[in-house]
Image (spheres, rainbow, N blue to C red):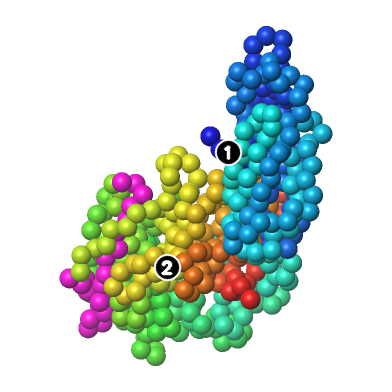
Amino acid sequence: MLKPPSVILALALVLGLCGCGGSNQCVPFTLQANTPAGMLLVGKPEELFVGPSLDYAGVCQSVEGAAIIASQIEVFDPDQQPVMLESTQNDKDKTGVTLRFTPTKVGRYHFFIGFDPIGGIQQFDLLAAQDRASEPPLHQLPQRCETLESTRSGAWICGTNVFRGTNSPQQLPFGRVEAVGDVVWVVTSAQVLRYVDTGEKLELTASIAHSSGMPESIRATENDVAVAHTSSIQLFTFDGSTLSHTEGTRWLFLESLGPVGSDGPRGLLFRTGDRLTAVQNLGAPEASFQACAFQLTAGRFVRTSAPCQSLEGFVVGFEPQSVWTTIRADPTGPPSMLRRLEWTGEEFVQTASLALPDTLNLAYPLRLLRSSVLPVLRPNFPFVTLQGRSAVPVYVPGDPLLRLMHMDAELSSVQASSSFFWGNVINDRMDVLGSRIRAITPSP
C-alpha cells in the first residue's frame, strides 16, 4: 500500500526499529527533523524527508547492512510538468531521501520515489497554497472571538462586544448576529433587534419581541431578516421606523433529527432574492442532508411545490448562497473531497471541488453558529500543535478546481468566514493576547 510521508513517519515513530527473526535486522528507521509540511507554499523553499516502504518481510537477511538508495525521483507540478529539484540526498542513516524544491504554482504536486535494493515505491500528493501570511493583518482585537462580524463604517463585532478604535466596547445582547453594510441584526431568544452603525456607535433603530426561543439560523438584508426558529420560518421587516412580521411557515419536517454539521444548528438558511432554502440533516445515512425551497409571498416565505433536494456529504461550512461539504472515502478517516455547492434559487449545484490528500484535515471545531463559515484546512502532521500552516479554500468563478490560500501560521484556534480569517495570538505561556484578523480576498 502506498503511503504519504506523514504516515511513514508516524509509523516509524510508533514501531521504532523494524526487525525480522534471527540475528539479522532490517535497516532501522529514525524520525527525521525535517518532517513533511503537509501543505506546500508557493514561493517558499520546501524540504521533505521521504522514507521507503515499511514492508520488509522476507528480505531482511539478504540486505543486511545495505544502503537504501532512492534510484528514481520524480515530482510533477499542477500542470503535470516535471519539477526541478534543487537538491536531493540520501539520508545519513540510509533510510530515505531528502527533497528540496520551491513550488511555483497553486495546486496539486505529485511525488514518485523508487527505492533500491528494497523499499519499493512511494507515491503521494501534496497541495500547494498561495502564501498570504507575509501581508499585513487587517486588525487585531484585545480578546478571543468565537464569532466575528464587521460594518462598513468600521465597527468590529466580536461575540457580544463591539469594538471601534481604542474606545471601550459597546455591549450587544447575546444571540445570532449578522451585519449587512452598516445594518446589524441581533436575534435573541426573545427579541429581534436592528442596529445601524452611525460611525460612532451601533444605534438601535427598532426591536420586536418574539416567543420562539433561540433561533437556529438567520439570513438578513438591510431591511428584513428571515429567522428559522425551532419549527417555523418568519420574516421580520423594517418599514423605516418599526419592525413587523407575518405568520411563520413550518420548515423542520424531520424534527427528531440532529444538527447540520458536527456542532451546528438544526438547520441553515440560504437566500437568493425572494427565494429561500432551508437545509436540514436527513440522519440516514449520516452524511446526507436535504434542501427545501420557499418563495416570498405576501410578506411570508411559503413552501414551493418543488420536492426537497437530497444531497450527500458532511456540511462543514456555508455562506449566504453556498454550502461547503466533505465526502469521506473512509467513514472514520479524514475527508477525501471538499465541495462547494451554490444555491441558484431552484437547487444546489456543485461549482467546484478539491480532492484532499491524507496529509490535510479540517480545523475543528467548525463553529457553525455564525452568519457564514469557511472551512479551514490544516496539516495532519505533526499530530499535536496549536499553531501551524492553515489555508482556506478559494473559489474562482468558472474554475471547477478549488484553490488554497494560506493565511497565517502563528495563530491558534483559527476560524474563517466569507470575509475574514482570524485566530488567537498566544504567548509562550499559552495566554490568549487577542485575535488577529486577516482579510480574505481573491487571489491577485
Residue 345 drawn at (x, y percent): 31, 75
Which numbered mark, 2 or 1, is in the foreground of this view? 1
Tell me the SS state at disc 1.
loop
Which residue position holds label 2? 351
The quadrant where residue 2 appears: top right
Which residue position holds label 1? 3
For badge 1, the amino acid type reads Lys
What residue is at 72 percent from the left and 10 percent from the top? 23
Q: Quadrant of the C terminus?
A: bottom right
Tell me the SS state at disc 2.
strand
The quadrant where residue 322 appears: bottom left
Verify whether residue 293 appears in magenta.
yes
Residue 27 drawn at (x, y percent): 72, 24
Q: Is residue 65 left or right of residue 413?
A: right
Distance, label 2 to label 1, CA atoms, is 30 Å
Q: Is residue 109 above or below residue 135?
A: above
Verify whether residue 249 appears in magenta.
no
Residue 396 drawn at (x, y percent): 52, 72
Asked whether the viewer can see residue 223, the reply is: yes
Q: Is residue 4 above or below residue 392?
A: above
Single out the residue that lies furthest toward the left: 305
Q: Is residue 379 above or below residue 64?
A: below
What is the magenta range? 285-305
Q: Nearer the viewer, residue 360 or 281?
A: 360
- Looking at marks 2 and 1 on the same chain, the residue that comes earlier in the sequence is marked by 1
What residue is at 69 percent from the left and 25 percent from the top? 16
Callout 2 touching callout 1 (CB < 8 Å): no
Q: Nearer the viewer, residue 316 or 106?
A: 106
